[in-house]
Image: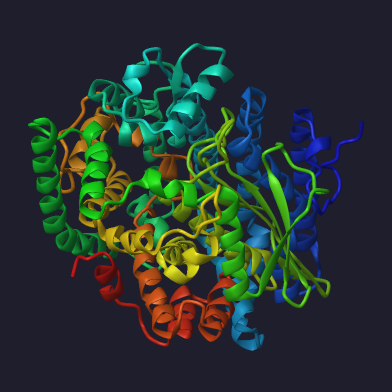
Amino acid sequence: MSNPLFSTFDNVPFSKIKNSHFKPAFKNAIEIAKKEIEFICTSKEEASFENTIEALDYSGELLSRISSVFFNLNSAETNDEIQKIAQEVSPLLSEFNNDITLNETLFKKVKHVFDTQKNLKLSSEQLQLLEKHYKSFTRNGALLSASDKEKLREIDKQLAQKTLQFGQNLLADTNNFELLITNEADLKGLPNGAKEAARNLALDKKKDGWLISLDYPSYIPFMKYAENRQLRKQLAIAFGAKSFKNNEYNNENLIKEIVSLRFDRAKLLGYNTHAHFTLEERMAKTADNVYNFSKDLLNKATPAAKKEFENLTSFANELDGIETLQKWDAAYYSEKLKQKLFNLDDEALKPYFKLSNVLHGAFTIAEKLFDLVFEKNTDIDTYHNEVTVYNVHNTKGDFIALFYTDFHPRPGKRAGAWMTSYKSQQQKNGINHRPHVSIVCNFTKPTETKPSLLTFNEVTTLFHEFGHALHGMLANTIYPSLSGTNVFWDFVELPSQIMENWCFEKEALQIFAHHYETGELIPMEYIEKIKESSTFHEGMATLRQLSFGLLDMAWHTTLPNNSFNVKEFETNAFKNTQLYPDVAENCMSTSFAHIFQGGYSSGYYSYKWAEVLDADAFAYFKEKGIFNKKIALKFKKEILEKGGTEHPAILYKNFREKEPTTDALLKRAGLL
């Protein structure tokens, strides 16, 4: 059978692709891309924007498509064979990328265009593309000596393999743990839906009893509702010990190696640290700005967080005589206190948040705001029977995008939720090629008696990832590297985080929050309680989020000596944000996939940074009406469609007509 990845394809032919196809396809696509680069380099014409910068941006299209298919499968539907292939092809891709950025002939042509740009009458998008490509060379070794270029190649090759290994270890260690409960009394407090899911999980594994895993839909309900404190402790310690145990999946040495390699790379390129290198291309610009921003929020959130923690401790003591609140008590007593203060139980809300209804609600809101229509397409090939595909059109009937959804945990899927792309939007040869995007989540599975019913946190997660998807789907730029979510990392969370706001609004909840059995609209008192409770323990939540950002910055602004201890380093980074007693068996860094596997190194602060933007932006919607077409059109035109075609500060100001302030965030969080 011929290799379906050898030729250009529109829709991904998943059912025709075998694992054995990937490595030959990568090698073939790399050779094609090399020829495209060689054509640019050997051209006898004077380097111009069109024959150099444009040609470079459009090159490697097949390689990009194959990479997106393969690495998305490695995240959502992996196996031992795919992971082995990933380890083999990552160095090839790293080498190819270095071949481009370290190509002296190519760089001379790019530099010529960059140096003569004043004579070229380029549009703002073209200028942005030129600067992006010029910096991709200068920031990635083009100015290095020959010997230093070889050092850079070796560093990048090792980083590609080690970050992959980090994720593989984490997935394996997560799947390695099971808590089998055989005495039903140990499930006391657990909602019936969670019990049924635990029973189904045990049956799937051919075990008798109830099985709890470290996947969020299994782990969270147990930590929130199970009365057995000892089992909560066992589960919490297991969750916090992922890739920190003395086994083959331990990530401590990998962290040391990754951090050291990133530091060496930054130094080689003339930067003080990895953070200095990374932040140069962020809205924040410098490590000092990130620290000042974080400390400012920390100062405002800490008094509230400490007060919340004291109140929670007192409550646990009054209720059950708990003297010292531990991490395995956090979700349990927070939920109890929330129920007491607001008479609001997450379990009581779940019947109103059937997954299919919530998704339809997101679609309806996208139609109201951005004139989008979603229609299921059962003819499109998928990589798993749980994946659903939708054709997305505007209300005029124009095709906008393909949209894939994948909602439930599986052994081959990494934890968390994310948006990704199978095909970038671009305009080429007079055709506006529309994108194919996907959201992947790990939501509560349906059972024999109930459909998938979401917690309110899962509802906001769905809207968050849908916001990223809208950013990808509505992309309308000329060049692929500036399209959709190809923006500064501390700006990319704005479209996702702003969408979460609709989940708290009565007008939006009335669209999708209907009881899955009766069709009854969620009671207005519940809506009011959702709003009232939205700032519950916001001080502690802010401290937690800031702690992750500060840990990330600590790893990437200093280089510990080789004898340092990962746990001790982390404990020191957490010292100003810690509320609960430390757990010796736990280490967050060894499972911190965002920064050691994903793209958030020196960038985790961006969630909070973008929260400032999203709160400020949504305040604009609130002022004019949450479905105000004029404001929605501005957001679509100035933010969602424009991708990285201008600096995000300019894009935001064009939308908001003023600079953002922290006032809206602090007000929303109840921290003013």
Image spot of residue 206 (x, y percent) = 57, 12
Viewer can see residue 352:
yes
- Relative to 112, does residue 93 appear above or below in the rendering? above
Q: Residue at x 49, y 79 (%)?
A: 651
Locate residue 72, reporting x and y percent.
Answer: 63, 42
496 w.r.t. 204: above or below: below
Identified at 79% across, 48% down, the residue is 378
Residue positioned 17% across, 43% down in the render:
578
Q: Nearer the viewer, residue 38 or 626?
A: 626
Q: How many marks?
A: 0
Vertical placement of residue 204 versus 407, above or below:
above
- Residue 167, percent across and down? 49, 33
Residue at point 44%, 17% (across, down): 248
| Quarter occupied by residue 253 | top left
In the drawing, does residue 555 fall left or right of residue 361?
left
Asked if residue 564 can be seen in this view, the reply is: no
Among all residues in the image, which is located at the extreme right? 1
